Amino acid sequence: MSAILDAFSSRRIFFVMLLGFSSGIPLALTGSTLQAWMVSERVDLAVIGVFSLVGLPYTIKYLWAPLMDRFVPPFLGRRRGWMLVSQIALFFVIAAMALSRPRAHPGVLAALAFLVAFFSSSQDIVVDAYRTEILLPEELGPGAGVHILGYRVAMLTSGAVALILADRMPWRLVYLLMAGSLAVGIASSLLAPEPELSEKRPRTLKEAVVEPFLEFLSRRGASGILLFIVFYKLDVVLASALTTPFLLELGFTKTDIGAVTKGLGMAATIAGTLAGGAVVARAGMKSSLWIFGVLQSVSTLSFLLLARLGHHYPMMVAAIGLENLCGGMGTAAYAAFLMSMCDRRYTATQYALLTSLMAVTRVVAGAPTGLLAKTYGWETYFAVSALAAIPGLLFLLRYDRWSAPSG
């Protein structure tokens, strides 16, 4: 127990949490919060819909991740230098958004929102690399947990808190306050320790682009690792894809759903990620992945029970709480595993690639969910979702045959 407490009280983990907060601030400012601002300014709904394209940089961030492995800013070091550059850029661009006029000049606002997404995804690249490199092996679990905690609190800040503030002050001031909240990340970049690199970083851009692939694919069990990453949270993706339509069809109000999913759900997720990080520190990576992989599947069965019971408020609360708690645990172990799979010479590139691969599961697996539920009903749908955990667990049987990064 003392080892776990020492891990959570680490100065390194403290800065990882603050950087998680900095990473989470920009997302809603180009998403749901921006949509609310445009609606209040009576921007045409078709224009608001097109604004979803400004989030494109988040999906292709691996394209410029090698630049952050190859080049080092002339201050603070390879990781802290890039963090500071991206955070200062975010501060100025979000402040510029605050001074824009959504209805009169939507094109200018779209360009600024796109820049926010670009610098935000760039910050994500280097923050992910930083925590992977700065944390000791026994700190990966707790580090993943507190990073998610900081990120979730930031999403609440730039999402719900920003909306509440917008009822009491002009949107311009709200966005200026959100820009100011990046001071947390800027201070962390200035004060946090720079990771020590035992191996040489890429010397050419070609090495930064090609070597991360060659190094990963040369490992024993590389294909199994990649397939495990794709399938490990497949059951969670399927179960959560249609949660809102499912609950609405059962007769729950939007207020019921919002209060439970955003209130209890977020609290359960945060508790799950912290608990998951502690278990990884205590039980180890392999055992934690097994435990949480099974728990994620079992928690999905609570929705199957809710489908059978119908409009049953206590069961709805229990299902959402259990799913978010177990999902949070699995996410902490999953994030820790991804960090452990990165060669520290190419952390930015490999982590960006692995998380992009993880996103493929969410996009592809989510596509047929509506047809499956419509054709076979909700009980069968959630039964299939629970069984979708099996492929990931089968690949986990080969865990001992996977080799660690060479760097």
Image: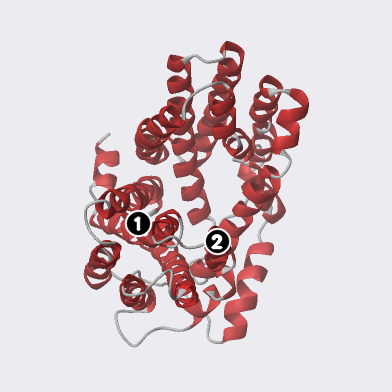
Q: Secondary structure at mark 2?
A: helix
Q: Which residue is mark 2?
A: 52
Answer yes or no: is residue 174 visible.
Answer: yes
User: Image height check: is 159 above or below 234?
Assistant: below
Of the pair 175 and 179, the residue shown nearer to us: 175
Give the labeled residue for mark 1: 20
Residue lying farthest top?
309
Where is residue 370 shown, x and y percent of the image?
70, 36
User: Which quarter of the picture shows residue 398?
Assistant: top right
In the image, taking residue 143 as reference, residue 228 lies left or right, namely right
Disc 1 residue type (three-letter): Gly
Residue occupying image coordinates x 71% and y 45%: 367
Q: Earlier in the sequence, mark 2 or mark 1?
A: 1
Residue 242, above or below 58: above
Left-right relation of 257 to 150: right
Which image quarter: residue 217?
bottom right
Write the residue at 32% across / 51% down.
163
Instruction: Give the residue type at disc 2.
Output: Ser
Task: Tell me, yes or no, if residue 225 can be seen here.
Answer: no
Q: Residue at x 24, y 65 (%)?
A: 173
Mark nearest the camera among 2 and 1 is 2
In the displayed structure image, the side of residue 170 where residue 47 appears, left or right = right
In the image, residue 249 sits, relative to residue 164, either above or below, namely above
* Residue at 66% from the left image edge and 37% from the top image edge: 397
Residue 12 occupies quadrant = bottom left
Q: Residues within 10 Å of mark 2 (few under 14, many from 20)?
A: some
Where is residue 311 shown, x and y percent of the image?
Answer: 52, 15
